[in-house]
Amino acid sequence: MERTRYFTFARRIIGNLFRKPATVGYPYEPVEYPERMRGHVEIKIEDCITCGLCARSCPSQAIRVDRKAGTWTINRFDCVQCGACVRGCPKKCLFMAKGYTEPDVTKKSDTYTKPHDEEKEGKRGEEKPVMDVTKCMYCSLCAKKCPQGALEVNRKELVWKVDREKCIGCAVCALTCPKKAIHMEKG
C-alpha cells in the first residue's frame, strides 16, 4: 500500500516536469481579468457633489460622505463590489475599475478630499431645478427622491417650491420626474 503511493507520487512529479504549467507567472506576467469582472469602486472626486446617494445605496454601508469636509470615504474590505453606488450616482463620478482589492493585514479605508478650487467652488451646485407648469402633474416623486429635502410639493394647491439653500444641484429630481417636467438651469 505504501509503495503504491510512492509510485503514484513519483509518476505525477515526472509527468509535471514535462507538461506546461497550469498556473500563470503572475508577478512576471500581467494579470488578465475575466471579461465580466466587476472590479473595485473608484471615484473622480473633482466631479463629486457629495450628495451622499452612493452611501445611501450601499448595501454593506462601506461608503461615508462628509459634505462639510468635502470627503468621500470607502472601506475597501466592507465593499462587496455590487456596483449599487455606481448606478446611484447622479453625476457619474463613480466607476468600477478592473482589479482586485489589495490584501492587507488590517482593515483600511480610502478617503478622497475634494480640491478647494475657488473657480470650481462657485460652479458647484450652480444648476438648480426648474419646473414646467404645463407638464407637471404634482405627483411629488421629485420631492420624495430629493436627497437633501430641498423640494416641497403640495398637490392640493398645485405648489412646487425649491429651497435654493438646501439644493445641491444633483439633478435627481429631473431624472425622477415621469413627465420630464423638471430641467436644470443655472441660477
Image (cartoon, helix red, strand yellow):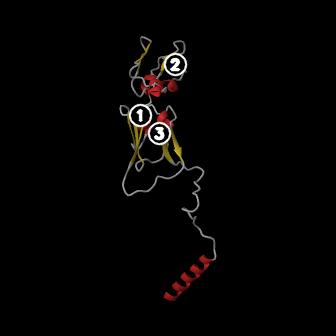
Q: Position of residue 131 (x, y in %)?
A: 50, 16
Outermost residue on the top side: it is 157
Mark 3 burial class by Cα count in 10 Å: few <14, some 14-19, many 20+: many
Dot 3: element: helix
Q: Nearer the viewer, mark 1 or mark 2?
A: 2
Dot 2: element: strand
Cα separation between marks 1 and 3: 10 Å
The dot on residue 85 is 3
Q: Amino acid at mark 1?
A: Gly
Q: Nearer the viewer, mark 3 or mark 2?
A: 2
Q: Amino acid at mark 3?
A: Cys
Residue indicated by mark 2: 185
Instruction: Name the image quarter holding residue 103.
Output: bottom left
Looking at the image, which residue is at 59% across and 68% down?
22
Q: Is tag 1's residue or tag 2's residue first in the polypeptide sequence?
A: 1
Mark 2 burial class by Cα count in 10 Å: few <14, some 14-19, many 20+: few
The dot on residue 114 is none
Q: Amino acid at mark 2?
A: Glu
Q: Tell me whether the residue at label 1 lies in contact with that at label 2, contact meaning CB atoms closer than 8 angstroms.
A: no
Residue indicated by mark 1: 52
Mark 1 burial class by Cα count in 10 Å: few <14, some 14-19, many 20+: many
Q: Position of residue 159 (x, y in %)?
A: 43, 13
